[in-house]
Amino acid sequence: MSIVIPSRTEILASADVDRAIKRISHEIVERNNQLDQLVIVGMQTGGTWIAERLATGVKQIDPSSTVPLGAVDISMYRDDFSLRPIVLSAPTDIPVDLTEKTVVLVDDVLFTGRTVRAALEALNDHGRPRAVQLAVMVDRGHRELPIRPDYVGKNIPTHFSDEISVGPDGVFVTVVEKGQA
């Protein structure tokens, strides 16, 4: 008889998450010389707290900047309705028209790319951005779509069945291993 033994491992501690957010904030400022044309949008729910921290980081680097912060719910834009139920996570709140803006789209984990695809479609309901840049705390690979992040906190090679959880307290991977009883 085999049993399933999940193991949870910390990949990044809270201080590592803080450093990654600070580094990504600097990269955003360095890459975007027109901060008045920048909007940071977090994907509900995992990307919103990271987006808030990035907006704070950009403001600390350039105190004269005012970068709008928004959130997007992609529930109605997903292409996997048959695989998972539609769960409205939190409302979309994008405070400005995105037309001709550079949007930094933020999520916690990049996996297959399907969530990002849905978010790109959702963003178009709020204008036509000049460019969209993708920031993620964790890139775990396994892409099903040709999507690549512009800013990455950490690349973590994983097995398809692994689970990654990201929060201010750290990044954890849960691996399910089969053992003998």
Image (spheres, rainbow, N blue to C red):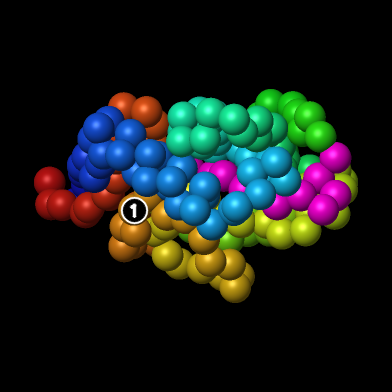
Seen at 53% across and 66% down, the residue is: 148
Q: What is the tally of numbered marks visible in this picture?
A: 1
Is 118 displayed left or right of 173 in the figure? right
Residue underneath mark 1: 154
Q: Closest to the observer: 87 or 107?
A: 107
Q: Residues within 10 Å of mark 1 (few under 14, many from 20)?
A: some
Seen at 59% across and 53% down, the residue is: 32
Determine the image quadrant of residue 22: top left
Seen at 12% across and 46% down, the residue is: 181
Q: Residue furthest bottom?
A: 146
Q: Does the image show residue 19?
A: yes
Q: Residue 136: give x, y in percent of width and height.
A: 48, 49
Residue 164 vs 48, above or below: the answer is below
Looking at the picture, which amino acid does disc 1 mark? Lys
Q: Does the image show residue 103?
A: no
Q: Residue furthest front?
A: 64
Q: Closest to the observer: 36 or 129?
A: 36
Q: Residue 33: give x, y in percent of width and height.
A: 60, 52
Determine the image quadrant of residue 9: top left
Q: Closest to the observer: 173 or 128?
A: 128
Q: Secondary structure at mark 1?
A: strand
Q: Is 107 one of the magenta-colored residues?
A: yes
Q: Closest to the observer: 8 or 181?
A: 8
Is 90 displayed left or right of 13 in the figure? right
Seen at 62% across and 48% down, the residue is: 104
Q: Main secondary structure of the magenta part?
A: strand
**Which contiguous range is marked in magenta?**
97-109
